[in-house]
Amino acid sequence: MDGFERLDSPAEEILVAAVTGTLYGVGMGPGDPELLTVKAQRILQCAPVLVHFCKRGRRGNARTIADAILRDPAREMALAYPYTTEIHPEHPDYVAALAGFYDDAAGQLADHLGAGRDVAILSEGDPFFYGSFMHLWRRLKDRFPVEVVPGVTGMSGCWTRAGTPITWGDDVLTVLPATLPLAALTERLRVTDAAVVMKLGRHLPKVRAALAAAGVLERAIYVERGTMAGERVVMLADKADDDAPYFSMVLLPGEGRRP
Ligand SMILES: C[C@@]1(CC(=O)O)C2=NC(=C\c3[nH]c(c(CCC(=O)O)c3CC(=O)O)Cc3[nH]c(c(CC(=O)O)c3CCC(=O)O)/C=C3\N/C(=C\2)[C@@H](CCC(=O)O)[C@]3(C)CC(=O)O)/[C@H]1CCC(=O)O
Ligand SMILES: C[S@@+](CC[C@H](N)C(=O)[O-])C[C@H]1O[C@@H](n2cnc3c(N)ncnc32)[C@H](O)[C@@H]1O
């Protein structure tokens, strides 16, 4: 799509600049603002509408990363989740509330885009990797031009801060959400060479049990808020409690071929 509509006229084809804005999904990286891409910074400086997700009453990690760049709150729109941990994600009330929340947000963004204003959605890490951006992208992509700017993922930031390569040689890397049941986590951990377990929060005791059952607990590294303020890196076996924020993960580095 080149941003122009072609109209046929008897004399010539007239190019008319399309009036719609572009929807940008902007990867913000894992936390450290120096890990923002040059492209992300340019779009943050120029876009007339800047959107970020957050938990009610909180600032939002994606928005916090932009602190060094954003100085104009008039351009900003916060989208606060109706629920995160208050009800189970498979409960019909959660599903209905989230669907309504995304529909409503997509409607608001469509108004801006339809009026010709570009909209940039700030996405922690990479927008297409478990990102909320995807739920708005799905609702808007067939009506408006879209550009996605990849970001350094949270897991990449975390294994870098842990000072460990994650895969060698033929290692297979498995990415697991900690929200899976214990049996599923254990089964996947048994067969993989390397793993990243995301979305820890209150699921850490279950993840610890799965790692132990798969016989790999001793190799597991716990990383909290990698590259962000308040970062913590520790071997999981040395972590005495099971308290973990949502923005934490467990890394299981591979031990593959090293000539
Ligand atoms: C329900 C649950 C299940 C699950 O994770 O599967 C879930 N979020 C949970 C917890 C939680 N979420 C957040 C916090 C506060 C964090 C803080 O402020 O520190 C907490 C923890 C807390 O409230 O304590 C905020 C948050 N969440 C997302 C973003 C935006 C982003 O990252 O793009 C931000 C703002 C981040 C920021 O600040 O930038 C994104 C997503 N969260 C989703 C689901 C997916 C939507 C699913 C749907 O549409 O149905 C989606 C799109 C992607 C995905 O995760 O797949 C899980 C409960 C697990 C449990 O305990 O059982
Ligand atoms: C909704 S997913 C978003 C992932 C993000 N789009 C990415 O590319 O990394 C949220 C999960 O990512 C992980 N995460 C993202 N950034 C992180 C960081 N800087 N430190 C620790 N965990 C992080 C956590 O496991 C968290 O539960």
Image: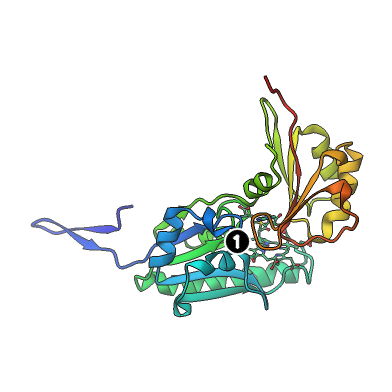
Snapshot quadrant of residue 164: top right
Residue 73 seen in the current view: yes
Does dot 1 land on a helix, a strand or a loop?
loop
Quick check: which quadrant has ligand 2? bottom right
Identify which residue, 125 or 223, lies in the foreground.
223
> Residue placed at 33% from the left, 52% from the top?
1
Residue extending farthest to the bottom is: 74
| Quadrant of the rendering where the C terminus is positioned | top right
Snapshot quadrant of residue 113: bottom left
Q: Is residue 220 above or below residue 31?
A: above
Say whether mark 1 is within 8 Å of ligand 1. yes
Residue extending farthest to the left is: 11
Q: Position of residue 256 (x, y in %)?
A: 72, 26
Counting every numbered tag in the picture gives 1
Snapshot quadrant of residue 117: bottom left
Q: Position of residue 169 (x, y in %)?
A: 66, 25
Q: Is residue 237 above or below residue 225?
A: above
Give the colour scheme of this rendering. Answer: rainbow
> Residue placed at 70% from the left, 32% from the top?
172
Residue 182 seen in the current view: no
Left/right placement of residue 34 relative to residue 15 reads: right
Left/right placement of residue 7 relative to residue 213 reads: left
> Residue placed at 61% from the left, 55% from the top?
30
Left/right placement of residue 210 relative to residue 64 reads: right
Identify the amino acid type marked 1: Ser
Left/right placement of residue 53 relative to residue 120 reads: right
Reading the image, the residue beneath label 1 is: 132
Q: Position of residue 109 (x, y in %)?
A: 47, 71
Identify which residue, 122 or 222, lies in the foreground.
222
Residue extending farthest to the top is: 259
